[in-house]
């Protein structure tokens, strides 16, 4: 018996994939969320509640699934690496513990995730599949883990706009995608500057639906235009080992041209 291990972020892509497995297949599903605690960006404060809302909705409206969560606290370093590498590491530790003879790792990567030169280079070098195979070789009961990563959105060549169209609006309204939210009165809002914010706004504008999903589009919040008054790297000085955590009120002063964490996903 196969079990799918879905690494879930609460974003549009992984939410669509969760909906896909729950409504289009009868494969046993284990969902896992990593609460990523980067000291420079309080993304977890908005992402983690979104995950809980989405999972609660799916439990109430679709079939059952198992769920687990973990937390990763990144020390205050400037170079944080790739989220997807951490997803693979955690999956290699969780997978052997799941029921089933074969555990298949599923990731919500889509075609547009590989538009940048950096991600295209990683794809050419097969870095993700090679890392996964190396982690399997190091895992206990490694025979249970499928060496092939499942990425249905890429395999089925589903463009991002189609994902927005096919995901039920009731679920889309629960998603959170911004990589580096701004906070006003302890409430998180889309930054409007990161890659996902720009992509979401472009797609929703093209579909004529920006007003339906204010949590994905900053312009719908009635907030001031994102500021870029300080260069992000100025917070770090010359020594990445001595990076301070940013005060919440300074989140809105980051320079869009130097947001290294925006490139961390893949």
Image (spheres, grey):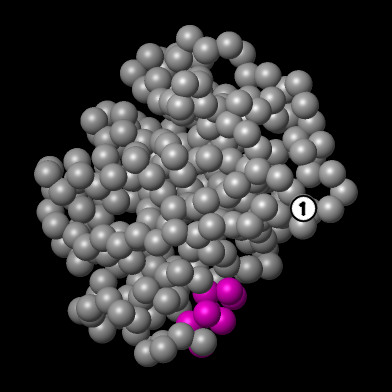
Quadrant position of the C terminus in the picture: bottom right
Residue drawn at the location 77% of the way across and 57% of the way down:
241
Q: Is residue 114 visible?
A: no
Q: Is residue 240 left or right of residue 213?
A: right
Q: Chief secondary structure of the magenta span?
A: helix
Residue drawn at the location 27% of the way across and 29% of the way down:
169
Residue drawn at the location 42% of the way across and 70% of the way down:
91
Number of disc labels: 1
Pick whichever, 255 or 150, lies toward us: 255
Label 1, on which residue?
A: 242
Q: Quadrant of residue 180?
A: top right
Q: Is residue 3 above or below residue 249?
A: below
Quadrant position of the N terminus in the picture: bottom left
Q: Is residue 245 visible?
A: yes
Residue drawn at the location 38% of the way across and 45% of the way down:
48
Q: Secondary structure at mark 1?
A: helix
Pick whichever, 8 or 119, lies toward us: 8
- Residue 191 belongs to magenta span: no
Q: Is residue 221 above or below residue 70?
A: above
Q: Is residue 180 above or below residue 213?
A: below
Q: In the rendering, at what x and y percent does residue 178 appear? A: 51, 35
Q: Is residue 136 above or below residue 179?
A: below
Q: Quadrant of residue 74?
A: bottom right
Q: In the rendering, at what x and y percent does residue 203 appear? A: 48, 26
Label 1 environment density (alpha carbons within 10 Å; few <14, some 14–19, many ≥20): some
Q: In the rendering, at what x and y percent does residue 59 appear? A: 15, 48
The stretch in magenta equals: 130-137
Q: In the rendering, at what x and y percent does residue 179 appear? A: 55, 39
- Residue 132 belongs to magenta span: yes
Q: Is residue 86 left or right of residue 55?
A: right
């Amino acid at each position: 018996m196969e079990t799918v291990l879905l690494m879930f972020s609460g974003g549009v892509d992984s939410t669509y994939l969760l909906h896909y497995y729950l409504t289009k297949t009868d494969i046993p599903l284990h969902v896992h969320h990593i609460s990523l605690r980067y000291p420079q960006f309080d993304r977890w404060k908005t992402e983690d509640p979104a995950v809980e809302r989405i999972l609660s909705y799916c439990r109430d409206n679709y079939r059952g699934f198992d769920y687990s969560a973990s937390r990763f606290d990144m020390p205050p370093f400037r170079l944080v690496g790739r989220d997807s590498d951490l997803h693979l590491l955690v999956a290699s530790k969780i997978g052997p513990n799941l029921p089933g003879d074969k555990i298949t790792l599923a990731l919500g990567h889509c075609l547009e995730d590989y538009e940048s030169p950096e991600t295209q280079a990683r794809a050419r070098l097969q870095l993700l599949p090679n890392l996964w195979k190396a982690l399997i070789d190091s895992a206990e009961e490694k025979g249970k883990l499928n060496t092939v990563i499942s990425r249905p959105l890429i395999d089925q060549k589903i463009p991002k706009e189609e994902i927005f169209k096919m995901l039920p609006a009731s679920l889309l309204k629960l998603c959170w995608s911004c990589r580096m939210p701004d906070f006003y009165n302890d409430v998180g809002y889309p930054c409007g500057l990161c890659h996902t914010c720009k992509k979401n706004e472009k797609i929703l504008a093209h579909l004529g639906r920006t007003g339906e999903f204010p949590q994905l589009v900053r312009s719908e919040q009635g907030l001031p235009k994102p500021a870029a008054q300080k260069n992000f790297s100025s917070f770090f000085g010359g020594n990445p080992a001595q990076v301070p955590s940013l005060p919440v009120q300074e989140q809105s002063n980051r320079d869009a041209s130097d947001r290294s964490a925006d490139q961390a996903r893949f």
